Image (cartoon, rainbow, N blue to C red):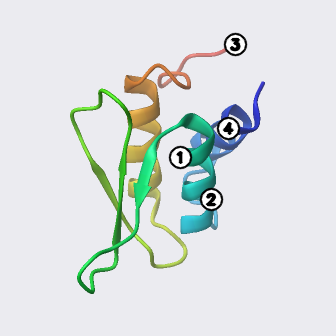
């Protein structure tokens, strides 16, 4: 299991954890995704994966709310990284 897989699994198990934008950046880097900082004075980071249709926007406020972590997990599942809801090893 890679570091990205372990981080994604921890996020999946505890989306309400004290996640930071640094955690999101580490995950994106490990998975080869793009994580763009806010531009023009905004506060939302943009996360996208190659061949992804959707862009997930995540506010940089700390801690990141669980809904945004769940959206990140959903993107990972759609891209073939991570397990779906209710799936086990």
Q: Which residue is mark 2?
A: 23
69 on left or right of 44: right
Find the distance from the CA under tag 3 to the CA under tag 4.
17 Å
Q: Which residue is mark 1?
A: 28
Tell me if mark 1 has few (under 14), some (14-19) or many (20+) residues whose alpha carbon lies within 10 angstroms of its own.
some
Q: Are marks 4 and 2 in contact (CB under 8 Å)?
A: no
Q: Which residue is mark 3?
A: 89
Q: Which mark is residue 53?
A: none
Q: Name the mark nearer the viewer: 2 or 3.
A: 2
Query: In the picture shown, does residue 84 fall above or below 66?
Result: above
Q: Position of residue 64 (x, y in %)?
A: 49, 68
Q: Quadrant of the N terminus?
A: top right
Q: Name the mark nearer the viewer: 1 or 2.
A: 1
Q: Identify which residue, 40 or 6, lies in the foreground.
A: 40
Q: Position of residue 39 (x, y in %)?
A: 28, 76
Q: Position of residue 52 (x, y in %)?
A: 29, 31
Q: Which residue is mark 4?
A: 4
The mark that comes first in sequence, 1 or 4, is 4
Q: Quadrant of residue 6?
A: top right
Tell me if mark 2 has few (under 14), some (14-19) or many (20+) residues whose alpha carbon lies within 10 angstroms of its own.
some
The residue under the point 40% across, 69% down is 37
Element marked by disc 2: helix
Q: Identify which residue, 82 or 54, lies in the foreground.
A: 54
Please say whether residue 61 is visible from this viewpoint.
Answer: yes
The residue under the point 27% across, 86% down is 41
Q: Quadrant of the C terminus?
A: top right
Q: Are marks 2 and 3 in contact (CB under 8 Å)?
A: no
């Amino acid at each position: 299991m890679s570091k990205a897989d372990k981080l994604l699994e921890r996020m999946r198990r505890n989306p309400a954890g004290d996640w930071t934008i640094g955690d999101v950046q580490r995950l994106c880097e490990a998975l080869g995704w793009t994580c763009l900082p806010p531009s023009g004075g905004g506060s939302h980071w943009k996360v996208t994966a190659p061949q992804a249709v959707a862009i997930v926007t995540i506010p940089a406020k700390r801690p990141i709310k669980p809904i945004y972590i769940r959206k990140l997990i959903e993107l990972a599942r759609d891209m073939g990284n991570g397990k779906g809801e209710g799936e086990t090893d």
